[in-house]
Structure formats: structure tokens, C-alpha cells
Image (cartoon, grey):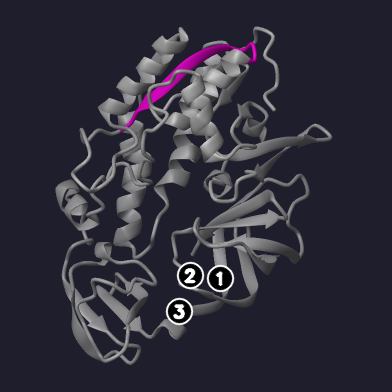
Amino acid sequence: MIQPGFGQRIAVALSGGVDSATTAALLQSAGWEVIGLTMQLWDHGSALPGQGRTCCALEDIQDARWVAQTLGIPFYVLNLEESFRQTVVADFIASYAAGRTPNPCIRCNQLLKFRLLLDKAMELGAAFLATGHYARIDSVQGVPQLKRAVDPDKDQSYFLFATRLEDLERIRFPLGGMTKTETRRLAEGFGLHLFRKRESQDVCFVPDGDYGAFFQRMGAPGTSIPGPIVDVNGKILGEHKGVGHYTIGQRHGLGVAVGYPLHVLAIEPGENRIVVGPAEALARLELTIGDLHWLDPEPLTASRALLAQIRHAAPPRPSVVTPLQAGFARVTFHAPQRAVAPGQACVLYVEDRVIGGGWIV
């Protein structure tokens, strides 16, 4: 249910997609004074054939502008390309060069959408910033709580764990109680032309999914230097194309064969080598997270039973989380987890509530 606006101003982050467009239309129909904000981040033009589409190309800004015109709302484009390059893209490149698997969407939400864009919304007199994310925010005794969306297939709370607690009070997610099918149906009913528009890719600045070519274009050091592929005993099995081409758990594209499927077990940039082995060697009972971000008013001072999710596509699993030195914690699972990748986020839940998370180190 959408809270009535009674003429109160709210900014909507218009991405050029159906979710944010429907968000703006819903809020306007509920009596909010809506203004549209779009971040200009990165552009590769139209998508390559068969490769999906980017999420921040010029065509998306044009679609966002069209939505604003259709709804008759003010529209602003913020050029954040340099901030995006210095924070999200630079972190992405550095992480792969260091043998980690980053999640740029979380960084973008953390550092741009719910920092720079939120601040701009407040400068324009908005009381809140709304987005098309599938997540929910509830308030318990005046404290905001970030929760999973009603639709488990579309839930995006994993990507939002690094949002600051004080900022959750100024953010709204009107689609958190809906399914994607309902959103498209509403968009069609509102007369929005993009109700059939396809989903965008997660990594918008690598529209064709070719990370190796991207690193070469960016002149990224240490990501595309060939080196040995070895087994767990150090035996050389072949040659890799550069550490930036691989991630933990990867099976395809290794170019080596030993009679059974091989998976990437470790990426060792210091030795410039990839360690491979059988699938069962990917199992881990423990991991350590750093840069711990905590959304609960009660600090983590002792071991606590929580659900831990180690990637967006993975289900949350029972675990015990133990605080370590400042900003670090150990996560011990009840059962082994497959392909724990340094650089990915481990998000912690109490039932459907995001209580915190950190980056796997």
C-alpha cells in the first residue's frame, strides 16, 4: 500500500526502466509532488546484439525523460560520471587485480544513489527519495528496518545492506510489496510506454560481459597478464589469460582438462596463478568479513545466530556470526557453503530483516 502524499514533495530516481517509472506514477497517483532524478554514469550506446542492454546508456536517460514528460513532473539529470569512475569502476578494476570478485551494484547504491543522489533530492526540497528497488522499509519504535521484498524472486535487499541507518529514514521503496508482473501491469495501466522493457544487466559498464576486453580498454594493470593454472599440489596444468578473467567457482573457459570437471578454487595475484580443483574442494564452513556495516541499534558484541547470504543468487543459510577486531567478523555456517568468493558481500538477516553485512576477505 502506497502512503498518501498530501502534496508532499518526493524525488524518484528514474533509471529509464519500468520499475522506477511505475514508482513515480504510483506516488503521483497517491498525491505526492513527484520530481524525477536521473544519474548519468556511463554510456556505451545501445547494447551489443545478443548481449542484453546496459542500465545507464543515453537511451535510458531518454526513456527517463519521456516518463517525466508523460507524468508532467520536473526532471533533472545529474552528471556523476567522474564520481562513478573514481569509486565504483576503480574499485571494480582494483578488486579483480587483487583476485577478488566485487559487486559494483552495491557500491553504486552505497556511494552514489543513497549518498550523492539522496543529498541532491534533499537540496531540491524533497522529503524522501524513492527508487524502484524490490525491498521494504518498516519502522519499529522510530527505528527504520530494511527488509526483503514480498516477491523472493525479485528481492534486492542484498544490494542495499550498506545503506546508512540514518538514510533509511529518507528512502522509500514503493514496489517492495509487489511482484514484477504486477509492476508491469500497473505500468501499462498508467500508459507508460516501457512496460515491456527488458531487464538491465547488473554490471552496466561492461555491457557485453567481456571483462577481459574491458580491462584492456581501461588499461587495468595486473588483470590480463597470462600465468599458470595449477592444481592444489602446484602442478601446472595450463595457462590462464589473466586473473581478471576468473572468479571463485568458475568452471567454464579454463582451457584445461584432467578427466573430471575443474573449478577455480583460488586466485593468487601475487604469484599470478589460478588454482583449480574438483567441486568438493570449494566447500567452506567459515569466512571472514571486513568493513562490517551494522543496521541494528544493538551493536554486535557477542556471537549471534543469524542467516547469512554470500551472493545475490544464493539462499540465506543459518550461521553464527562472531565479532572480531573493529570492522571484522567471523561467519560460521551450520553446513559447508560452495564457492565463497573474496570481494563479494555477505549479508546478514534476522528472518526477513537485513541486520548488517560486510565484504568477504
CA gap, disc 1 and disc 2:
8 Å
Left or right of 116 in this view: 137? right
CA gap, disc 3 and disc 1:
12 Å
Q: Which residue is mark 2?
A: 340
Residue 284's x, y, as percent?
53, 78
186 and 14: which one is in front? 186
CA gap, disc 3 and disc 2:
8 Å
Residue 103's x, y, as percent?
42, 52
SS at badge 1: strand
Q: Earlier in the sequence, mark 1 or mark 2?
A: 1
Q: Which mark is residue 287?
A: 1
Of circles 1 and 2, which is in front?
2
Which portion, as a residue range, is magenta?
Answer: 30-41
Q: Which mark is residue 282?
A: 3
Q: Amino acid at mark 1?
A: Leu
Q: Amino acid at mark 3?
A: Leu
Q: Badges 1 and 2: C-beta atoms under 8 Å apart?
A: yes
Residue occupying image coordinates x 64% and y 33% = 168
